[in-house]
Amino acid sequence: MGAQETLAPTSAEIIARVPLGERIRIRVGRFLAYALITLVSVPIVVMYVWLFMQSVSTRVLLGFIPEHITFENWRFLWSKVTIGARTYSSIWPVSRSWSFW
Amino acid sequence: MTSEVTTIETLQESTASLPARLRSWAAYAVFLGPFLFLVTTYFFLPVILTTALSFTGMDSKMQWEFVGLENFRRLFSDPIIPKIARNTLIYVVFTCLFNVAFGFILALLTTYFVEHENVGLVFRSVWLLPRMTPPVIYVLMWQWFVSPTEVGLINQIRQAFGMSPQAWLARHPMPIVILVNGVIGASFGMIVFSAAIKSIPVDLIRAARVDGASDLAIVRRLIIPLLKWPIMFLTIWQTLSLLASYDYILLLTDGGPFYKSEVWALNAYHRAFSSLQFGYGASIALVLVIVGILLTMIMLRLFGFERMMEPTKVGA
C-alpha cells in the first residue's frame, strides 16, 4: 500500500515538483475555473434568494431586499389558509400522503 | 459458441418435463411481465391510439369519425406550420447544444478543475436546484429575472447603468425559452458527465500530467474521447425529450408572442386541448413520433452505436 502511494503521487505533489512558471500557469487556470463556475452559478443562487425574500416580506426594495418582514405567507405551516372565498385545509395531512407515496 | 449454447438450451427445453417448462415460463412471466405491461400500456398503446385518432375528425363531441388523410392535408397546408417547424428546429438544436456543451463544462469545472470535492459538490447542488424545483416556481423566478417592469433583475442592472427597461420576453422569446430549458437540461448533463469523468482511472490523468500534457490537452485528448458514450446518450436523449417537451414554454410564453416561441409539441397540445380538435392534434403529434424515430436511427448511425457497444479498452 505504501509502495503504491509512492508510485502514485497526488495532483498537489505533482504540481509541487513542476517549475515555478508552470506552477503559476496551473494556479491561474484553477483560479479562472473557480471564477467561471461562481459567475455562472450566482444567477441561480440570486433567484432562490429572491424567492425566499419575497416569501418573508410584504414589500421588497429593488425587487430583492425585504423591507417589512412577515411570516404571513408561511401561515400554511400552522393554520388553514383562506384566500378569497376558498379555505385550504392544513398542509400536514397532504404531506403525510405525499411522503407515503 | 453462442449458437451451440442456444442449441443445447433449446434441446434441454424440448426434453424437459411439462412442470419444468411451466416453471421456466413462470420465471419469464415474473421477470419480463411487469416490464412488458408497462411498455405496452405507456408506450405502444398511446402510439397506436394517437395513430388511430389522427385519421379521425374527433372534436369536443368525442366522436370517432373517420376522415382519412384530411388532417394531414390540413397540416401540410396550414400557413403557420413552417414557422412552427423552424421554431422547433431552433429550439431543439440550440437547447440540446446548450445542455450537452454546458453540462460538460459544468462537470469538467466541478470534477476536474475544482479539486476540493466538497466545493465541487456545493456547485453541483446549486445547479441541481432548478431540477428539484416545481416547474411553476422555476418559471416564476425566470419571469422575475426577465420581467419587463423596473423590478425585473436584468432591468434593475440596466437601470444602474442608466439604460431604460426592456420587455425581454416579448422581444426575445426564443433565446429565453432556450436558456430556461438549457439550465434545467445542463444539470442532467452535469450529473452524467461528472460520473463519467470520475470513472476515468486517475492514473491516466496523472500519467498525462507527468508527460507534460496541459489541462486543455488532457480534456481534448483524454477526457472527451473517453466520454463518447455519455455524449451520445445525452445528445439522443435530450433531442427526443426536447422534441416532445413544451411544459416550460407553455408556462413561460404559451408559444407567444405571435407564435414566436410555439414549437411542434406545444402546437399539438394547443390544437387538442385548447381548440379541442383531438384528431388534428393527434396528427400533429404523430408527425413528431415519426420524426423522433427517424432522428434516433440517424443519430445511432452517426455516433457509431455498434462500435461503441464493444468492450472498453480503458482499464483492460
Image (cartoon, coloured by chain):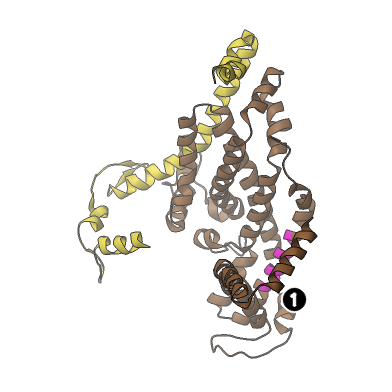
Chain colours: A yellow, B brown
Query: What amino acid type should be assigned to the residue bearing mark 1?
Result: Ser
B83 sits to left or right of B19? right
Q: Residue at x 64, y 61 (%)?
A: B243
Q: Which residue is mark 1?
A: B77
Q: Residue at x 78, y 52 (%)?
A: B306
Name above or below for residue B152 compared with residue B92.
above
A101 sits to left or right of A2? left
Q: Is residue B34 magenta?
A: no
Image location (x, y in percent) of residue B73: 75, 80
Q: Is residue B287 magenta?
A: yes
Q: Which residues are magenta?
A: B286-296
Extreme residue in the top direction = A20
Image location (x, y in percent) of residue B156: 45, 41
Q: Secondary structure at mark 1?
A: helix
Q: Residue at x 49, y 27 (%)?
A: B116
Front residue of B73/B148: it is B73
Extreme residue in the left direction = A79
Name above or below for residue B194 compared with residue B184.
above
Image location (x, y in percent) of residue B277: 59, 81
Chain of the residue under label 1: B
